[in-house]
Amino acid sequence: MNTSEFKFQTSDKKVENLSVTWQTPSNIALVKYWGKSEPQIPKNASISFTLNNCHTTTKIEFTKSQSMPQAEFELFFEGKKKDDFKPKIAKFFKRVQEYCPYVLDYKMTISSENSFPHSSGIASSASGMSAIAMCLMSLEKELNSNLTDEYINKKASFLARLGSGSASRSIEGPLVVWGNHPEIENSSDLLGVKFPYKIHPIFENYQDTILLVDKGEKQVSSTVGHNLMHNHPYAESRFIQANENLKKLSEILQNGDIKAFINLVESEALTLHAMMLTSNPYFILMKPNTLEIINKIWEYREENNSNICFTLDAGANVHVLYPDSEKEDINEFIKSKLADFCQKNQYICDSVGFGAKPL
Ligand code: PMV
């Protein structure tokens, strides 16, 4: 594994103060990452759709200071000081200081907000960590004007991964692979790469409506869940299956076999949750309404010869996936038949997006 290309070398400029703002998206995995080894190396390759409307906006104000033994920062979330998020970010800065030693030379004020409702059960770590990574890369670009955009995206994904594995897939779009895989050119365990082959038009502007079944805090964090894959009786076969599924999905994304897409994506979602059910200690993140929705989706698909399908994150919310061409009918179905199973009837209409944006 060669991480040396990500070590900051030299600066050709002095920077006293800088304020940068990035908007970076969340993503939804189609082939799931569940299980890792140190330092944030995935046990199998994964692929996700980058989202468009679910994103984090983060501003970092850097002020030059004497070099400090550890990164110093203040954190504001949606306008309020948020000290309970600080340990995770402090850990992130500690991990990246080897590659970005300049984090010790600046005091940072981080102000962040999400486009999706707070504690909606939508993972904000992917968008949150990728936004901080892009802000760091903006400072690095000021310090070293020779950096190319390609290098900036690569290193941002590399850094984001050290904060949260799935965050490595939130720099670019519309489809990003993370994890070394023989069929995906240039794929790497260290960072996410844009899916390198031509995507069939049926998967363009793919829709994702996120049904907010349970907005509470998860009882089991993804960190704990990943760790339970060590000594898991089905872990090894799961990692093999995921890599095989990614090979199949790569072909499907190119040839447009949407029935095969539906089958693979739903199987991945249920397998992820099957890993949770068969961990020890075991746990269940789905709620009764998650299953109600899945059954309604299956019924609707059967009756209408529709291409609707679902996937799940590490939580109870359901991501309803469908082609843009079926949007009108499926939106009507969601509104009339699925919204009742959501907390306060809430859901978020999203679609595939293209990654990080400077503001
Ligand atoms: O990036 P983490 O550590 O929050 O793990 C994410 C795991 C899943 O969302 C369940 C799957 C994935 O590939 O995004």
Image (cartoon, rainbow, N blue to C red):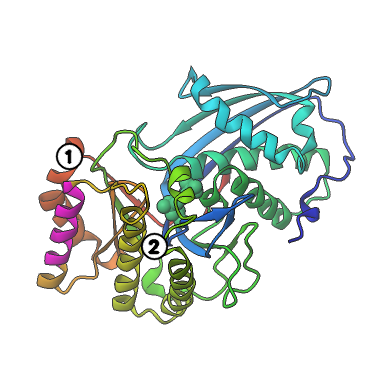
Between 325 and 315, the one nearer to me in the picture: 315
Residue on which disc 2 sits: 205
Q: Picture coordinates of residue 304 (x, y %)?
A: 12, 71
Vertical comparison of 145 with 66: above or below:
below
Which image quarter: residue 203?
A: bottom left
Between 84 and 62, the one nearer to me in the picture: 84
Q: Picture coordinates of residue 297 (x, y %)?
A: 17, 61
Determine if residue 323 is in view: no
Residue on which disc 1 sits: 345
Q: Which residues are magenta?
A: 288-300
What residue sits 36% from the left and 51% below the top?
A: 313
The secondary structure that dominates the magenta segment is helix
Q: Which mark is residue 167?
A: none
Left or right side of 19 for 170: left
Q: Picture coordinates of residue 249 (x, y %)?
A: 43, 74
CA distance separating discs 1 and 2 = 25 Å
Vertical comparison of 251 with 281: above or below:
below
Which image quarter: residue 186?
A: bottom right
- Quarter of the N terminus within the rendering: bottom right
Three-letter amino acid code of the residue under disc 1: Asn
